Image (cartoon, rainbow, N blue to C red):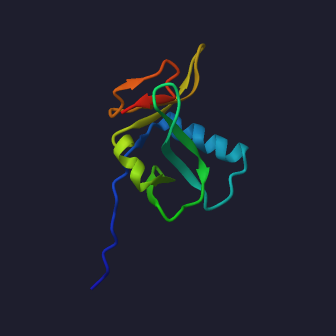
């Protein structure tokens, strides 16, 4: 009998625009093979928590997910703050960058990079 591997559902989603921007950034910054997109939170920011978004290697406390062919890393304890969040890429006249649509955020700051839970 074949061994069944645990399949984890990604707690976040990435829009097509975000995936395209991340792939472009990976190429421009020559991100090494084996690195994944780290998504998380840290204390600070004007509303209490701020988002972590960057490229990193998997650590012992991480869960690993695959979203549209992209390896996504998240510290297990961060999922409670990020469950259901959508990351998008915004390109407008006044704003350019990643946006975080987090249903767990009670309040977000004006810049959109921090929140309270």
Q: In this rendered view, identify the residue nearer to me: 11 or 5.
A: 11
Q: In which quarter of the image is the C terminus?
A: top left
Q: In this rendered view, identify the residue nearer to me: 15 or 61.
A: 61
Residue under the point 56% across and 39% down: 20
Answer with the quarter of the image where residue 32 lies: bottom right
Residue under the point 51% across and 25% down: 46
Task: Locate residue 34, reporting x and y percent.
Answer: 61, 62
Q: Give the number of marks.
A: 0
Q: Is residue 84 above or below residue 5?
A: above
Residue under the point 36% across and 30% down: 105
Q: In this rendered view, identify the residue nearer to me: 114 or 98.
A: 114
Answer with the quarter of the image where residue 101 lies: top left
Q: Quadrant of the N terminus?
A: bottom left
User: On the rendered structure, is 73 left or right of 117?
Assistant: right
Task: Locate residue 87, reporting x and y percent.
Answer: 46, 36
**Residue furthest out toward the top:** 93
Task: Locate residue 37, reporting x and y percent.
Answer: 55, 49
User: On the rendered structure, is 110 left or right of 92?
Assistant: left
Task: Locate residue 4, reporting x and y percent.
Answer: 30, 75
Q: Is residue 112 above or below residue 19?
A: above
**Residue furthest out toward the bottom:** 1
Residue under the point 49% across and 18% down: 110
Q: In this rendered view, identify the residue nearer to me: 72 or 52.
A: 52
């Amino acid at each position: 009998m074949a061994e069944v591997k645990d399949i984890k559902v990604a707690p976040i989603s990435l829009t097509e625009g975000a995936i395209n921007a991340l792939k472009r950034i990976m190429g421009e910054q020559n991100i090494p093979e084996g690195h994944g997109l780290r998504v998380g939170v840290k204390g600070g920011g004007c509303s209490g928590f701020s988002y972590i978004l960057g490229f990193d290697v998997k650590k012992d406390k991480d869960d690993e997910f695959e979203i549209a062919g992209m390896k996504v890393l998240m510290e297990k304890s961060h999922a409670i703050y990020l469950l259901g969040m959508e990351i998008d890429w915004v390109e407008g006249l006044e704003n350019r960058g990643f946006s975080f649509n987090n249903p767990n955020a009670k309040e977000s700051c004006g810049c959109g990079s921090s929140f309270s839970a």
